[in-house]
Image: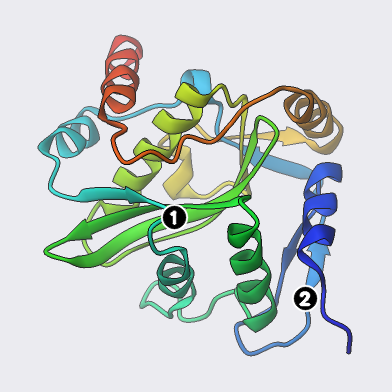
């Protein structure tokens, strides 16, 4: 069986579809094009008062793109609330390749020298396709998401694709849009210039996001 190429993934994202697998141990990978697409509107991203306090405590050391492979491993490990995952060996390989090509990015939460949470996704034009997140400590993935959004807003991104809507994402203002509307938003984002900010210090961007969120709470 021939392996998928990372370039094919980029083409798939550009037309609005994304890869999945039924389970970690299923070698088959397929592409998904849902009728309704989940997105996190960047201009109305909601950070609760309690989460703002958590972010400002700065309990975690936030790093970007320092150990993308470890984030993939964290997102693919079984947990009590999710005993299985859609990240099979093929998907693992493909996203690692996208990272090496400069398209895949990770936001990582570290504490006492250990990674305790994070997320990863793919940047293409002014669109960021959020793939998965994980926490080994309370609120780690939420804090990582806040830092991601701050970087996206500061870098000129216009679309944060969450693929589907979950209760976890709804608290941040995630919404569903019909497929055709999503494709219009995506097309506009792909035409817009943006460069993902992967610098070590994003705190000024985070402070600006928290301030704007507090004005709309």
The residue located at (81%, 59%) in the rendering is 7
User: 35 or 146, which lies in front?
Assistant: 146
Applied colour scheme: rainbow
The local crowd at label 2, few if under 14, some if 14 to 19, many if 20 or more residues have their Cα within 10 Å, is some
Q: Residue 59, how many percent across, how many down?
A: 12, 48
Give the labeled residue for mark 2: 29
Which labelled disc corresponds to residue 119? 1
Instruction: Give the SS element for disc 1.
Output: strand
The residue located at (20%, 50%) in the rendering is 61
With respect to residue 105, does 156 lie above or below?
above
Q: In the displayed structure, does residue 62 sit left or right of residue 91?
A: left
Q: Which of the 4 quarters of the picture holds residue 90?
A: bottom right
With respect to residue 52, does 109 lie above or below?
below
Q: In the displayed structure, does residue 168 sit left or right of residue 141?
A: right
Instruction: Give the SS element for disc 2.
Output: loop
Which labelled disc corresponds to residue 53? none
Q: Is residue 179 visible?
A: yes
The local crowd at label 1, few if under 14, some if 14 to 19, many if 20 or more residues have their Cα within 10 Å, is many
**Mark 2–mark 1 distance (CA, rounded to whole Å):** 21 Å
**Where, quadrant-wise, is the C terminus in this rendering?**
top left
Q: Residue 196, how many percent across, how many down?
A: 53, 36
User: 204 or 26, which lies in front?
Assistant: 204
Q: Is residue 33 visible?
A: no
Q: Residue 84, how many percent across, how many down?
A: 52, 80
User: 210 or 95, which lies in front?
Assistant: 95
Q: In the displayed structure, does residue 137 sit left or right of residue 16?
A: left
Q: Which of pointers 2 and 1 lies earlier in the amino acid sequence?
A: 2
**Where, quadrant-wise, is the N terminus in this rendering?**
bottom right
Q: In the displayed structure, does residue 42 sit left or right of residue 29?
A: left
């Amino acid at each position: 069986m021939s392996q998928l190429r990372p370039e094919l993934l980029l083409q798939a994202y550009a037309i609005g579809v994304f890869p999945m697998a039924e389970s970690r141990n299923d070698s088959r990978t397929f592409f998904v094009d849902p009728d309704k697409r989940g997105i996190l509107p960047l201009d109305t991203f909601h950070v609760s008062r309690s989460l703002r306090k958590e972010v400002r405590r700065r309990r975690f050391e936030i790093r970007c793109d320092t150990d993308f492979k470890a984030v993939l491993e964290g997102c693919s490990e079984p947990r009590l609330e999710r005993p299985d995952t859609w990240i099979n060996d093929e998907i693992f390989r493909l996203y690692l390749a996208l990272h090496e090509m400069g398209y895949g990015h990770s936001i990582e939460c570290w504490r006492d020298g250990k990674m305790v949470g994070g997320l990863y996704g793919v940047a293409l034009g002014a669109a960021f396709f959020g793939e998965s997140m994980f926490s080994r400590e309370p609120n780690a993935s939420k804090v990582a998401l806040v830092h991601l959004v701050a970087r996206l807003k500061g870098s000129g991104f216009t679309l944060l694709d969450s693929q589907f809507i979950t209760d976890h994402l709804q608290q941040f203002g995630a919404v569903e849009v019909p497929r055709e509307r999503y494709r219009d938003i995506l097309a506009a984002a792909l035409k817009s210039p943006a460069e993902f900010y992967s610098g070590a210090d994003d705190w000024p961007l985070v402070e600006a996001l928290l301030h704007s969120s507090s004005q709309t709470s």
